[in-house]
Amino acid sequence: MYMAFLSAAERSFLRAVSQFAYCNPFLPEHTEFERAALGDDFVEGEPVWSQTVEDPERPRANVWRIFERLAPLAEQLRDRLRAGASPREPDLILYEDAILHLLYQRYYPRFYEAGFGTARDQSGRWRFYHDYLADWRCFFELDGVRLPTHHEPRHTFACFRQIQRAFDQIFRDIIGGSIPAARLRAAIWQSVFTHDMRRYRRTLYERMGEFATLITGPSGTGKELAARAIAQSRYVPFDDRKLAFADDETVSFFPINISALSPTLVESELFGHRRGSFTGAIGDRKGWLETCPALGSVFLDELGDLDPSIQVKLLRVIETRTFHPVGDTASRQFRGKLIAATNRNLAAAIRKGAFREDLYYRLCSDQIATPSLAEQLAARPDVLNELIVYMARRVAGAEAEELAKDVTAWIERNLGPDYPWPGNYRELEQCVKNVLIRRDYRPSRAAAEPIEEITHDFRAGRLSADEMLSRYCTVVYRQTGSYEETARRLQIDRRTVKSKIDAGLLARLSPGAG
């Protein structure tokens, strides 16, 4: 007698769960899949996942509602398979996806506690693998049932740990409830897992270190935070005999601030050197490229300041994964991942001959753009209050709430809602600290001078009329600090001025911008 495996309603629910489980959790589509899975039981909330000021660790209610509905259904489906149901392959894949999601949610609290809680004893942190493995066998190892995907429990356990670590790292460090902030979190997630997590799980988990990542954006927008999130979210194999990951030793982050060092020191920090290879080289030294393990990452901050001679050597590292220490002829191998960041316009630097075009194209296979604070506030003005509270908690502890009120009131009285925050998050943090110490903050309004670049593009005929208006509005707005005054001077509508502000150019017009 034929036994039906899935009803139409169950199949619809499992399809939504499958989409939900494999989508990018930081994009608004995640909410739509929750809604599709839960129907009338869906709880309305924010359109994107971000920390909330009121309860930063609060889990999303819909996630656990899906889990509660899925758990009994998974057991029913397992029992139907044991009783002889013969589903088609697409339904078996839905079953596999459902069980994977069930196990991830079931063990997420234990992954979190082992990774971020107090259980730091390496010998016992992952002992719950035995419980996980028992659940795995209960759902996947069924007599007479051949599942199509052939998932492997040890590798899946490692993937679960990576997903938990990546989610918590990105969720905790990249804050802001605006759509630009959500896009940044989503872009970091893609840098770790690509857009296709099924393909990543099958093969790409071993190869993502081969892809360099380039992070661009105005100064003070959290490029190093994005780099750390990527570096600390890499896949680490699990040893099921030792019940251990090697993450404490191998997921490492080696930052180099290129603008803070001379070219000679940058080269030495990066490639290492032999004794006597330059003045002051009194002994052999390994550089970060050699020190970095296979699961580590080297971060080059302020890449746009890299000396042309070192750009050539870096290009070779990316192309061949090999390099030579300064003063040495023996080749070394770079086994880790390369992440670079810049606030400079590399396209303009290429036109001027200051940056190699071939190096740029080697770097930009994976590119992330960090949004300015002005972009976040344009999309959602109340994000400013959220960020002030987070920063106040970091610098004032128990006094955070009162400090946040003082800072908010000071900004309203002295800067107003249209202040462009040219120094971005870094400037806002300085404002919070200044108000804490002196109950005052004095921003510098002196503009820098990347005007030559605009003039050059204008004379070369590279700007469309819309681009020209955008840049002109930005320059005048940088001088006035007011949408109304800019609109009056240019004799256009205030809303037009606000829509035309180029946040990246605004940041580069600010003091200290590269």
Image (cartoon, rainbow, N blue to C red):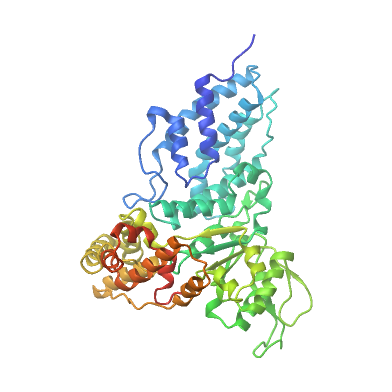
Report whether residue 17 is seen.
Answer: yes
Q: Is residue 201 above or below residue 291?
A: above
Q: Is residue 118 above or below residue 107?
A: below
- Does residue 56 appear to the left or right of 348 in the view shown? left
Q: Position of residue 463 (x, y in %)?
A: 49, 65
- Does residue 324 appear to the left or right of 231 in the view shown? right
Q: Is residue 282 above or below residue 489?
A: below
When asked about the image quadrant of residue 160, the answer is top right
Name of the residue lying farthest toward the bottom: 279
Q: Residue at x 64, y 31 (%)?
A: 140
Front residue (pair 279, 142): 279
Q: Residue at x 47, y 52 (%)?
A: 183
Q: Position of residue 63 (x, y in %)?
A: 44, 38
Q: Position of residue 144 (x, y in %)?
A: 70, 22
Q: Quadrant of the N terminus?
A: top right
Q: Position of residue 286 (x, y in %)?
A: 68, 76
When asked about the image quadrant of residue 264, the answer is bottom right
- Does residue 344 appear to the left or right of 478 in the view shown? right
Q: Residue at x 79, y 78 (%)?
A: 329
